[in-house]
């Protein structure tokens, strides 16, 4: 007898359909995750592995329509490290967010993996920067600048912010705790950035990283394993993609065992970490309390509400909806074709209210490069879930349908406790089925074996991380082949002392970013396109020298003939172009005014923009000037265009006051990693 799944949950409702969010052509390439910004609820941020970057969609929702007001493609200037194969994104309540990367840190295959990889922290309250690491101004391409990065989770598959996690340093409280799915080590890792190093710094000494042994997580290559956290109940829900299950973890459980940087009997040290300073706390914890919550074929996306848990099955393309109170599978809705569904997210209450629904679910169809929106035809009737056949069946005191024991097991009911009958491991809370009976799980004793072959290689012994941890980084010597603060570092690193020949295989590319070598030949890309020449700028960025016929800060625009070198040419970067990244419109230099012709009638005056209008077209400016026929009015019109083109970003620069529980950070002259 098959299980009838006939419940009703708020985000799925009655007879749901699936709509596609209309995005500009090229806005998305190969998306894998999405999250709303709680500090700006109309902003939907999408992590895109096709660009190793993000797309911010500013949306507006009415009862029967969702539209995108604006789409910005944003990346880090060194996305090949900070967002390499980005797998996930998670926001905190004040507009900071972190990404995780399914990467071994190979710089797009140009370097042997050095496993120095983990979550990257950003802050939407920090102004976007240009290529020179200066505040983005009209005419500039605008980039994200990370405020911290930690490096203990290669092949990180998912992460979530912990709103209740905090640390206090010098009387200041910081709430920068994230939980991450460490796919390489198959471990759950807790990251506390504490006082982040801020934009432009390289200090990783103030952070705490915990590795949890016992729970084994299973990575499914290419399938993000997203996470959701009930910060109040202290319950973490994990899509364990390779094990076809959802795991629930008590995040306040566990105990300190040892220093992860120091070897113990039968336990080698984890020798790749962010800082050798004593203030960098890197530890191994044991005693984590966890259980299998549900059985889902290759789960990926996950979203949590007060009453329901929604899980995206990558294998089937369906969203599974569970009643949180009972753990019963209440509803299943097809959202995308099999093997395409990844991240999902619930819209903030203000967005759901605009759609006149209690909850609104957004999902990523990766193969179609599309965001889907689930639209119930009707809301759930009062009491519909409690009266459903599936909920009653899983609480009737009888073993029936797919249950492996009374009211447990199978696809729909809660998991079975130790000692109850099982057919497969996923019937059990412990995920262990022994001879038809659920048995206690055997905690996995994790080790650093994932790193063994790398740690014994010559590449590791010559790496920047090895010399940082074991060598003398005070100056250039045989102990320090990476004197990143030396004036000639960028021109000398990797070169043979005798022949001067450059050998990129001898270079740890992380040192190039730390040393501000943005234009180094060994890096995987030249940021200047169309034949532009990259030139380092003060150790913290770069500029582009453009060949004849091209202009723009990355030589991305062809100069239009006969218009003053292209100053009045269209400046918008098309999202489906080879350079789709967000650009602030420049302030144009107006062309010389035409000679007045008294015999020609004056054209009708065009309407002026309404108050609050966000832009004026160059055509409108020219028409205003022509209708008045005077150079004075032309100058005034140009000033109006300057005013609207200079509209400030809607987020202020982060300061100690604006950050609330964050301190202001100085900008240093070297970049960070």
Image (tube, rainbow, N blue to C red):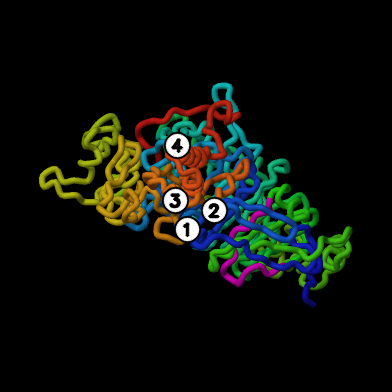
Marks 1,4: beta carbons within 8 A: no
- Residue 217 spot, x, y in % from top left: 56, 56
Of the two numbered discs 2 and 4 in the rendering, the one whose residue sits closer to the viewer? 4
Marks 1,2: beta carbons within 8 A: yes
At a point 41% along the width and 46% down the height, the residue shown is: 596
Q: CA distance from mark 2 to mark 3?
A: 47 Å
Q: Counting residues from the N terminus, which is met first, the one under dot 2 or under dot 4?
A: 2
Q: Counting residues from the N terminus, which is met first, the one under dot 2 or under dot 3?
A: 2
Which residue in the protein does label 2 denote?
Answer: 71
Corner quadrant of residue 344: bottom right
| Segment colored magenta | 333-347
Q: Counting residues from the N terminus, which is met first, the one under dot 1 or under dot 2?
A: 2
- Residue 521 spot, x, y in % from top left: 25, 50
Dot 2: element: strand
Using the image, determine if residue 655 lies above or below residue 148.
above
Q: CA distance from mark 1 to mark 4?
A: 37 Å
Q: Counting residues from the N terminus, which is met first, the one under dot 3 or under dot 4?
A: 3
Q: CA distance from mark 2 to mark 4?
A: 36 Å
Q: CA distance from mark 3 to mark 4?
A: 20 Å
Side of 240 relative to 321 (left or right)? left
- Residue 259 spot, x, y in % from top left: 48, 37
């Amino acid at each position: 007898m098959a299980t009838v799944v006939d419940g009703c949950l708020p985000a799925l409702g009655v007879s749901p359909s699936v709509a596609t969010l209309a995005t500009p052509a090229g806005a998305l390439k190969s998306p894998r995750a999405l999250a709303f910004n709680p500090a700006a609820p109309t902003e939907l941020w999408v992590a895109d592995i096709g660009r190793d970057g993000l797309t911010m969609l500013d949306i507006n929702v009415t009862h029967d329509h969702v539209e995108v007001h604006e789409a910005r493609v944003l990346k880090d200037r060194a996305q090949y490290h900070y967002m390499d194969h980005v797998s996930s994104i998670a926001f905190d309540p004040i507009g900071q967010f972190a990404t995780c990367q399914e990467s071994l840190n190979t710089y797009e295959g140009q370097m042997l993996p050095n496993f120095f990889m983990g979550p990257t922290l950003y802050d939407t309250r920090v102004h976007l920067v240009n290529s020179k690491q200066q505040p983005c101004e009209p005419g500039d391409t605008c980039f994200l600048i990370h405020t911290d990065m930690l490096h203990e989770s290669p092949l990180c598959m998912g992460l979530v912010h912990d709103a209740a996690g905090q640390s206090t340093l010098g009387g200041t409280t910081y709430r920068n705790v994230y939980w991450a799915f460490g796919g390489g080590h198959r471990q759950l890792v807790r990251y506390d950035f504490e006082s982040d190093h801020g934009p432009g710094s390289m200090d990783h000494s103030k952070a705490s990283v915990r590795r949890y042994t016992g729970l084994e997580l299973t990575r499914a290559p290419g399938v993000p394993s997203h996470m959701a956290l009930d910060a109040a109940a202290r319950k973490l829900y994990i899509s364990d993609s390779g094990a076809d299950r959802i795991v629930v973890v008590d995040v306040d459980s566990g105990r300190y065992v040892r220093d992860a940087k120091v070897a113990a009997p039968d336990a080698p040290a984890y020798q790749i970490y962010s800082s050798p300073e004593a203030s960098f706390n890197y530890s191994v914890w044991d005693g984590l309390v966890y259980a299998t919550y549900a059985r889902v074929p290759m789960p990926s996306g996950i979203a949590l509400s007060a009453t329901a848990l929604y899980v995206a099955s990558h294998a089937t393309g369906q969203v599974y909806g569970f009643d949180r109170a009972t753990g019963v599978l209440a509803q299943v809705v097809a959202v995308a074709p099999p093997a395409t569904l990844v991240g999902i997210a619930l819209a903030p209450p203000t967005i759901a209210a605009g759609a006149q629904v209690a909850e609104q679910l957004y999902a990523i169809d990766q193969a179609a490069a599309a965001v889907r929106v689930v639209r119930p035809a009707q809301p759930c009737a009062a009491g519909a879930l409690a009266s459903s056949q599936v909920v009653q069946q899983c609480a009737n005191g009888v073993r029936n349908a797919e249950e492996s024991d009374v009211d447990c097991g199978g696809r729909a009911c809660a998991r079975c406790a130790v000692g109850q009958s099982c057919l497969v491991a996923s019937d059990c809370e412990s995920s262990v089925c022994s001879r038809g009976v659920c048995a206690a799980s055997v905690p996995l004793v994790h080790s650093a074996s994932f790193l063994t072959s790398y740690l014994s290689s010559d590449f590791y012994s010559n790496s920047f991380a090895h010399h940082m941890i074991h060598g003398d980084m005070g100056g250039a010597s045989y102990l320090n082949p990476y004197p990143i603060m030396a004036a000639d570092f960028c021109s000398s690193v990797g070169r043979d002392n005798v022949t001067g020949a450059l050998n990129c295989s001898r270079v740890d590319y992380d040192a190039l970013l730390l040393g501000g070598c943005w234009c180094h030949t060994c890096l995987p890309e030249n940021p200047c396109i169309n034949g532009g020449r990259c030139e380092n700028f003060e150790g913290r960025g770069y500029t582009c020298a453009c060949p004849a016929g091209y202009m723009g800060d990355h030589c991305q625009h062809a100069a239009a003939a006969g218009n003053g070198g292209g100053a009045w040419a269209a400046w918008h970067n098309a999202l489906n172009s080879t350079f789709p990244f967000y650009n602030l419109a420049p302030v144009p230099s107006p062309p010389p005014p035409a000679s007045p012709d008294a015999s020609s009638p004056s054209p009708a005056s065009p309407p002026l923009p309404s108050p609050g209008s966000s832009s004026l077209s160059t055509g409108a400016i020219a028409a205003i000037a022509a209708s008045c026929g005077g150079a004075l009015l032309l100058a005034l019109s140009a000033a109006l265009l300057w005013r609207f083109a200079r509209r400030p970003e809607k987020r202020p620069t982060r300061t100690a006051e604006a950050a609330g529980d964050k301190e202001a950070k100085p900008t240093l002259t070297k970049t960070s990693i």
